[in-house]
């Protein structure tokens, strides 16, 4: 669509102008509700394109209104920034915070009206502001808590696909897992080569009973199970980790196996019975990144550090077959140009293509063979690819352009995964940054505007045309991890999308919430469904014409998996699974947890290990009838 009449052309966002161009990108959407309603969408006319990496946010402060017409009303102040993690688990309030009724004065004040959107009329109030945190997006959860805090509850379950950003946390504990150390190499060109034939190390392997050969305590987690409650099909205790804690990124479920990475190992269990399927595979250094998805033929790639020193980089790639555990090709990621190192990498799968993103570029490989396919580098005046998101046959690129100039902006491009050819490019209006993708196909993006303290959720057609933006007047709260050293476009859970509808959970604190179904055609709410318990719920996936959602456990009841019809006049939930009351406390302890519903079974795993030998920490659990 065109720009509003009498409105001058706008540049796109990108790094804020008052920050140095070399800084790291802001976190984007995170745990906890955004503290302000949307202003206007971030899409406008293309501008000149120099490049830059996005930059960290400034402290929260009253918004500065739009720098270009239409001005619209000033946005409300964001309020104090969220606490940052320090020693131990963060002690922030839960991810939802206090909810406010539509139109009421919330903790930071709702505006009386919204400024005009980029395409004319102002968004009309609907079923809730999608309150994602703007800049910064510090998580607002204690350990776990996928849906908010409850008084007296200990660690909660935070619904995040594992991300290396949790490495900023420092947790108590003393035992360090003994491993071999590699060198501090780096800088070589990526070279794919056959690795070993799948032979494993002598690390402890998990048994079908749930214990490991290392001598974990035997527990009967089904003892005292009540009528109507599901079973704990199996559980696995966490491996040893340093006292400072360790990342446990990713969780991949196939028809045969449930695979989980933790610290320096990748474990595989029978999806139905938890029996050791293969491995574990042990790496010489800690795992630092992993593909959130898998290829069509069940392949994943994990990255691990090339050493343990201060100069170590996350540049060692290893392909793994999820069903067999066979280790395929191994490669090393080369550094890019100046300020474009492989200190941290982002791994994205699109069909049979692996995209390895650095801070200012990306390299694509055939995930089956490790053959390099192409590079995505600086283009135009100065546009640098800074993040990627992948789907079955789609690869989306976000570039930062014209850093340090008055034409700073982001650009979204749709790429042919096999060749890297650009199908279309959509410039983003100056001042806005693409922080997350809630979906790749259809494309749904979450944007933030630092200066306006504003957010926006926009959707696009297959050919890259603006489709709609969410119109809302209360808080939404999908679960998004931190993105400190990269944007992590696909680091959100608690949100689902189908061809025509976006499903978002409303904010809540230790109480029932709702899931709102939003039309992708016009951005308006179609229907809403209330949690069947006095605890919040969040979407997981759409399956067989029904929305599958997870309801958080309470003091006296386990979590639930429910289904909600997406069509018809009734959107009442039907319980598919009620987890045992006796394991509710354990279910609540998975830190940075990943969840999945597959084959009628519910899986939950930790995204971060505490490293505390005194706690009998669980790595993964499976529930079923």
Image: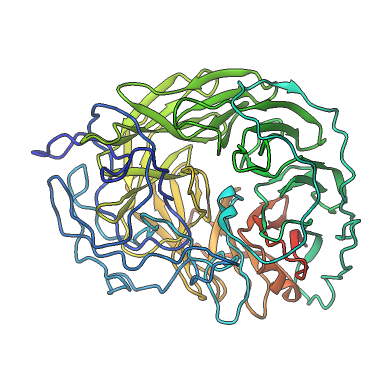
Residue drawn 90% across and 62% down?
215
Residue drawn 28% across and 56% down?
453
Q: Quadrant of residue 506?
A: bottom left
Pick the quarter of the image with the N terminus. top left
Q: Give the vertical position of 554 relative to 243 (above or below).
A: below
Residue drawn 83% across and 28% down?
196
Residue 551 lies, in percent from the top left, at 59, 66
Residue 58 lies, in percent from the top left, at 33, 55
The front one of 287 and 251 is 287
Residue 525 lies, in percent from the top left, at 37, 57
The front one of 130 and 461 is 130
Residue drawn 58% across and 66% down?
87
Q: Quadrant of residue 411?
A: top left
Residue 241 lies, in percent from the top left, at 74, 56
Pick the quarter of the image with the C terminus. bottom right
Question: In the rendered view, does 428 fall on the left or right side of 486?
Answer: left
Count of numbered circles on the image? 0
């Amino acid at each position: 669509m065109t720009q509003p009449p009498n409105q001058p052309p706008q540049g796109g966002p990108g790094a804020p102008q008052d920050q140095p161009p070399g800084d790291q990108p802001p976190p984007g959407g995170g745990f906890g509700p955004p503290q302000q309603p949307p202003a206007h969408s971030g899409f406008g006319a293309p501008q000149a394109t120099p490049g830059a990496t996005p930059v960290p946010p400034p402290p929260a402060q009253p918004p500065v209104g739009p720098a270009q017409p239409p001005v619209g009303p000033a946005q409300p102040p964001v309020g104090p920034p969220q606490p940052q993690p320090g020693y131990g688990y963060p002690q922030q309030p839960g991810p939802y915070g206090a909810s406010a009724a539509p139109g009421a004065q919330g903790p930071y004040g709702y505006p009386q009206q919204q400024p005009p959107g980029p395409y004319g009329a102002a968004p009309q109030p609907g079923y809730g502001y999608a309150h994602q945190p703007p800049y910064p997006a510090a998580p607002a959860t204690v350990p776990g808590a996928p849906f908010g805090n409850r008084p007296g509850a200990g660690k909660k379950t935070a619904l995040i696909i594992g991300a290396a950003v949790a490495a900023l946390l420092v947790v108590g504990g003393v035992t360090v897992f003994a491993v071999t150390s590699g060198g501090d190499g780096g800088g070589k060109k990526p070279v794919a080569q056959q690795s070993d034939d799948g032979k494993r190390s002598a690390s402890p392997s998990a048994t079908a009973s749930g214990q490991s050969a290392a001598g974990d305590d035997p527990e009967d987690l089904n003892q005292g199970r009540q009528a109507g409650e599901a079973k704990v099909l199996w559980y696995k205790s966490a491996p040893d980790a340093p006292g400072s804690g360790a990342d446990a990124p990713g969780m991949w479920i196939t028809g045969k196996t449930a695979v989980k990475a933790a610290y320096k190992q990748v474990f595989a269990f029978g999806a139905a019975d938890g029996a050791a399927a293969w491995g574990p595979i042990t790496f010489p250094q800690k795992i630092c990144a992993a593909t959130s998805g898998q290829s069509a033929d069940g392949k994943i790639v994990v990255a691990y550090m090339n050493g343990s020193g201060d100069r170590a980089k996350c540049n060692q790639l290893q392909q793994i077959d999820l069903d067999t555990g066979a280790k395929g090709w191994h490669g090393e990621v080369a550094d890019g140009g100046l300020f474009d190192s492989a200190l941290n990498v982002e791994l994205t799968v699109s069909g049979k293509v692996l995209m390895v993103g650095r801070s200012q570029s990306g390299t694509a490989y055939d995930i089956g063979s490790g053959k390099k396919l192409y590079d995505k580098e600086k283009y135009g005046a100065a546009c640098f690819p800074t993040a990627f998101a992948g789907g079955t046959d789609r690869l989306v690129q976000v570039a930062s352009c014209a850093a340090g100039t008055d034409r700073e902006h982001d650009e979204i491009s749709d790429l042919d995964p096999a060749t890297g050819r650009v199908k279309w490019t959509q410039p983003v209006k100056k001042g806005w940054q693409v922080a997350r993708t809630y979906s790749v196909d259809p494309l749904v993006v979450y944007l933030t505007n630092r200066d306006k303290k504003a957010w926006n959720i926009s959707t696009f057609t297959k050919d890259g045309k603006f489709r709609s933006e969410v119109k809302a007047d209360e808080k939404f709260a999908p679960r998004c991890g931190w993105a400190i050293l990269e944007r992590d476009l696909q680091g959100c859970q608690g949100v689902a999308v189908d061809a025509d509808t976006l499903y978002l959970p409303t904010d809540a604190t230790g109480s029932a919430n709702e899931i709102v179904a939003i039309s992708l055609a016009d951005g308006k709410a179609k229907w809403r469904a209330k949690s069947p318990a006095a605890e919040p719920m969040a979407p997981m996936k759409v399956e067989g014409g029904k929305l599958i959602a997870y309801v958080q456990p309470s003091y006296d009841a386990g979590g639930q998996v429910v289904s909600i019809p997406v069509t018809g006049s009734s959107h009442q939930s039907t319980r598919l699974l009620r987890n045992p009351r006796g394991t509710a406390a354990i279910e609540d302890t998975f830190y940075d947890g990943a969840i999945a519903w597959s084959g009628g079974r519910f899986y939950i795993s930790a995204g971060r290990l505490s490293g505390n030998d005194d706690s009998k920490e669980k790595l993964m659990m499976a529930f079923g009838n």
